[in-house]
Image: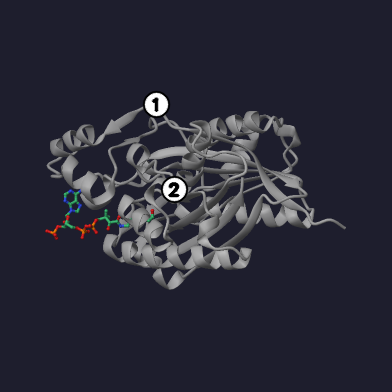
Amino acid sequence: MANIYSRIAGTGSYLPPNRLTNQDLVRQLAERGIETSNQWIVERTGIHARHFAAPEVTASELGVQAALKALEAAGVPASDIDLIICATSTPDMVFPSTACLIQQKLGVGGQAAFDVQAVCSGFIYGVAVADAMIRTGAVRRALVIGAEVFSRLLDFNDRTTCVLFGDGAGAVVLEASDQPGIVASCLHADGRQSGILCAPGTVSGGSVLGDPTVKMDGRGVFKLAVTVLEQVACEVLQVAGRDASCIDWLIPHQANLRIMHSTARKLNLSDDKMIVTVGEHGNTSAASIPLALDHAIRNGQIQRGQTLLLEGVGGGFTWGAVLVDY
Ligand code: UT7
């Protein structure tokens, strides 16, 4: 029997309309007595602006917009999808899953739907799981979404985190194919490092216990991120039996331009082979990679036939990579 692979049939993304430049944010924070500057944010992160969802807008609402665009690009009706995976760390509710709420908003039912929680690596985890299920023949078409309203988790009195993140969503339709598609994927986690990036609150008896806003040891995360992103890039290339010269586009998690440049350098890739949207989106956690992917496909940077290396890293600590022949 011929091997089954999965291929990207279509992508979509969505940003909420409220765009805040660094200057807007610096002004708002100054009113609270929090001192920061456009210069600090740009020099340390590469971020110039981010989008924030209106208070009543949820992750599933951003996610369904991205999903509809991905379905349209793939030319596939929602009823032909066999599996919906949503990567999010800012779900609408404790339950049901954001994937089920997106399914409801798409007006369909019956197919499997669940969330993955791997924070900024969540989309990579979701794609790897969907790819595995397509390869076994369990499903033929999967919708994988990364959707975040990360602004909800921010403490606007903590300048070390609140300037970094934004809201948004991205999605891909994966479908079974006799050609790859997804060439290889590698996932990792190290729960011993859970404390360096966390939102350590929970719900109990109708109240929030602990502090559910983002806490980050920025330097610790930075150091670990540059190490594991290089390791997992080499690993996924080795699994695929290829070397870095096959990569047309590096699409790393969009958290910090300095981390992204460091990864490209270690792979001997020139900066113009890297998709960069962090400047305009900020860090949108699980949404960052599908947002970057969709933007680069729609603006013509990424073309069919090219090879893409997608890489995620984030809370958990989690990290992973997916090599794609697009
Ligand atoms: O999405 C998951 C993955 N997350 C990441 O990849 C994030 C990884 N980490 C980072 O991107 C960087 O560590 C940060 C951007 C968070 C911070 O950059 P850094 O170069 O590591 O700065 P730092 O934490 O070492 O802080 C340098 C200085 C400190 O002042 P002192 O102690 O040197 O006087 C901070 O207090 O910058 C200060 N600082 C700020 N100053 C102005 C921290 N935040 C701000 C701010 N505005 N917003």
- Left or right placement of residue 300 versus residue 144 in this view: left
Q: Quadrant of ligand 1?
A: bottom left
Residue that carries the numbered disc 1 in the rendered image:
17
In this rendering, the count of numbered labels is: 2
Residue that carries the numbered disc 2 in the rendered image:
273
Residue located 16% across and 42% down the image = 37
Q: What is the quadrant of the N terminus in the image?
A: bottom right
**Extreme top residue here?**
17
**Extreme right residue here?**
1
Residue located 50% across and 62% down the image = 233
The dot on residue 147 is none
Q: Check disc 1: other Cα within 10 Å, few if <14, some if 14-19, many if 20+.
A: few
Label 1 element class: loop
In the rendered view, would you say 23 is above or below 91?
Answer: above
Q: What is the quadrant of the C terminus in the image?
A: top right
- Left or right placement of residue 192 versus residue 116 in this view: left
Residue 97 can be seen in this image: yes
- What's the residue type where badge 2 is placed? Lys
Residue located 50% across and 57% down the image = 118
The residue at label 1 has a CB less than 8 Å from ligand 1? no
